[in-house]
Amino acid sequence: MTKPYTRLQDHERETISRGLSAGWTFTRIAAIINRDVSTVSREVKKNCSLRRCYRALRAHEQAIQTRHRLKQQKKLDSDPALQTYVLTNLRQQWSPQEIASRLVKDYPQDMTMRISHESIYTYIYCLPRGSLRKELITCLRQERKLRQNRKHSHDKRGRITNAISITDRPAEVTERIIPGHWEGDLVMGSKASNSAVGTLVERTTRYLLLVPLEAHDALTVRQEFAKAMKKLPRHLKRTLTYDRGLEMAEHELFTKETKIKVFFADPYSPWQRGTNENTNGLLRQYFPKGTDFRTITRREIQQVQDRLNGRPRKALNFEMPNEVFPRLLTHQNIALEG
């Protein structure tokens, strides 16, 4: 029968402290106080980085503070209005930081509607195991899996003729002050379906256009991207930065149709299109890897586009792209962080 766990007592911590000072091993200390070696190891590592620095009194006080903190009622449990706001927007796939910062804008005078993003994370992961905890964790943006080395895939895809390097791109693009400069890419679906959706992101406002694609060959991509961009006013159609994918092989025809000059990032350099890479990561919350885009309707794609454009962004001082972008359509001046 397994012995029930009990917290370490004062005299046990004192024995640990004395034993470490005398140079005893964890195994010897554990045998003396009749505890598992792992219990002693965790206790020491939790309270100091070096064995000889462990002090019984300090460890005991830290344990009391931890127990007291765990017993305190969480702010989200004691404030129904705040809890409703946080949970509603978590279910919209907003990040805790976006929620915490947007509260200040939505409730500028109500100081009760404040919570840090760390507190939101703590609330989620401290929930008892169950459907709510599982649901809220899946709402968080998942850490991206390690990217494979793309060198060989670039080599296999061949080269794009007359590609203009990103090094020739106007300096104003980097500064993000003048709008109308875009980044583009494809989010690929399952290998079996050979499907994809195009993503076009405006660098200044982070406004996203999702382009449904029946195929991702150069002809289809050029026609569908051009169709999406033609709806925009001229002052919002300046440049497009793309990777070296052969789906943009007809870039010269694209430029002729739209007057948008295409610049190509260096191979294996996704950070040169960081806005687009970040947006694609957000998009994967709605369309996970392996999605068959043939089964996704245009209406569903539009709904995801609207949701992402209605998500507060740190780079916009936690305004939303669909708040900032319309001001550009009417030539209103805006001030944004880079």
Image (spheres, helix red, strand yellow):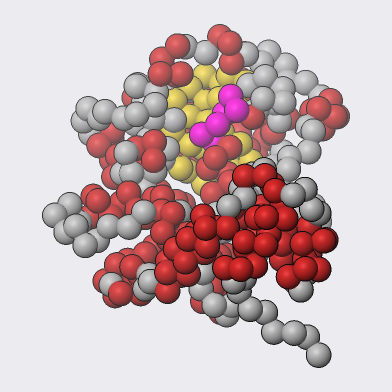
Q: Nearer the viewer, residue 259 or 200?
A: 200
Horizontal placement of 101 versus 212: left or right? left
Residue at the extreme top: 168
- Quarter of the image with the N terminus is bottom right
In percent of the image, x 44 and y 63: which residue is there?
A: 65
Against 217, residue 191 (above or below) is below
Relative to residue 101, is residue 36 depicted above or below?
below
What segment carries the magenta color? 271-276
In this picture, residue 4 sits left or right of residue 86: right
Position above or below: 35 against 235: below
Give the total number of marks visible in the rendering: 0
Where does the image place residue 241, in percent across and percent down from the top left? 55, 25
The residue drawn where x is 56% and y is 9% is 168
| Image coords of residue 70 (percent x, y) | 46, 70
- Check residue 277 for magenta coloring: no
- Residue occupying the far bottom of the picture: 1
Q: Residue at x 34, y 37 (%)?
A: 316
Q: Quadrant of the C terminus?
A: top left
Instruction: Kindly identify the residue that appears in the image at 51 percent across and 37 percent down.
Output: 200
Residue 188 appears in the rendering: no
Q: Is residue 4 visible?
A: yes
Closer to the camera in the image, 59 or 141? 59
Q: Nearer the viewer, residue 306 or 296?
A: 306
Q: Quadrant of residue 223?
A: top right
Q: Is residue 175 above or below residue 328?
A: above
Coordinates of residue 92 in the picture (x, y in percent): 44, 62
